[in-house]
Image: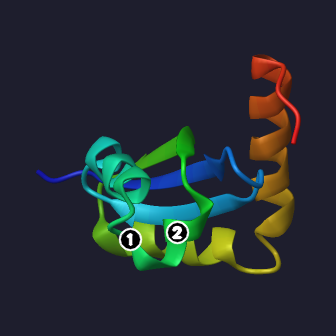
């Protein structure tokens, strides 16, 4: 059975987050960093900072939609803060 991942990337250039959904977040990160994803071309390079696994595609896309919403901003900010704290980085 396929697994679906919701992933969060942080731009090393500007510290902003990007949320996406994929069956393979590692290869998707490579696509973002190679510049082949138009929406993130100018913000590369990226680091994968968070993944969530889902059995159902619909559940993964609903989670992605939530994280991209205004209500999901708090959750995304906590993910960013935790990553930066654990990696002693600042933007």
| Disc 2, SS | helix
Query: Looking at the image, which is closer to me, 42 or 85?
Result: 42
Q: Is residue 81 above or below residue 37?
A: above
Disc 1 target residue: 37
Q: Is residue 27 left or right of residue 53?
A: left
Indicate the quadrant where residue 85 lies.
top right
Picture coordinates of residue 54, whole percent (x, y): 37, 53
Residue 89 occupies which quadrant of the picture? top right
Residue visible at 65% across and 51% down?
11
Left or right of 72 on screen, residue 12: left
Q: Is residue 50 visible?
A: no
Q: From mark 1 to mark 2, how far is it between C-alphas?
A: 6 Å
- Residue 18 visible, this angle: yes
Between 46 and 6, the residue placed more toward the observer is: 46
For the residue labelled by badge 1, is the local secondary structure a helix, a strand or a loop? loop
Q: Position of residue 41 (x, y in %)?
A: 49, 68
Quadrant (top left/top right/bottom left/bottom right) for the C terminus: top right
> Which residue is under mark 2?
40
Q: Is residue 70 above or below residue 85?
A: below
Q: Nearer the viewer, residue 15 or 70?
A: 15
Residue in the image at 55% along x and 47% along y: 46
Label 2: few (<14), some (14–19) or many (≥20) C-alpha neighbours in 10 Å: some
Quarter holding residue 59 = bottom left
Residue drawn at point x = 83 percent, y = 46 percent: 78
Q: Position of residue 64 (x, y in %)?
A: 54, 69
Q: Measured from the top left, where is residue 15 in percent x and y?
A: 77, 51
Q: Which mark is residue 84?
A: none
Marks 1 & 2, CB-CB < 8 Å contact: yes
Q: Residue 65 or 14: which is nearer the viewer? A: 14
């Amino acid at each position: 059975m396929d697994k679906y991942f919701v992933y969060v990337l942080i731009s090393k250039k500007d510290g902003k987050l990007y949320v996406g959904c994929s069956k393979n977040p590692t290869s998707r990160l490579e696509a973002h960093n190679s510049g082949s994803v138009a929406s993130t071309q100018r913000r590369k390079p990226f680091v994968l900072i968070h993944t969530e696994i889902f059995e159902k595609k619909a559940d993964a896309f609903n989670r992605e939609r939530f994280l991209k919403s205004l209500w999901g901003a708090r959750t995304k900010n906590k993910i960013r803060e935790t990553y930066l704290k654990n990696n002693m980085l600042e933007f």
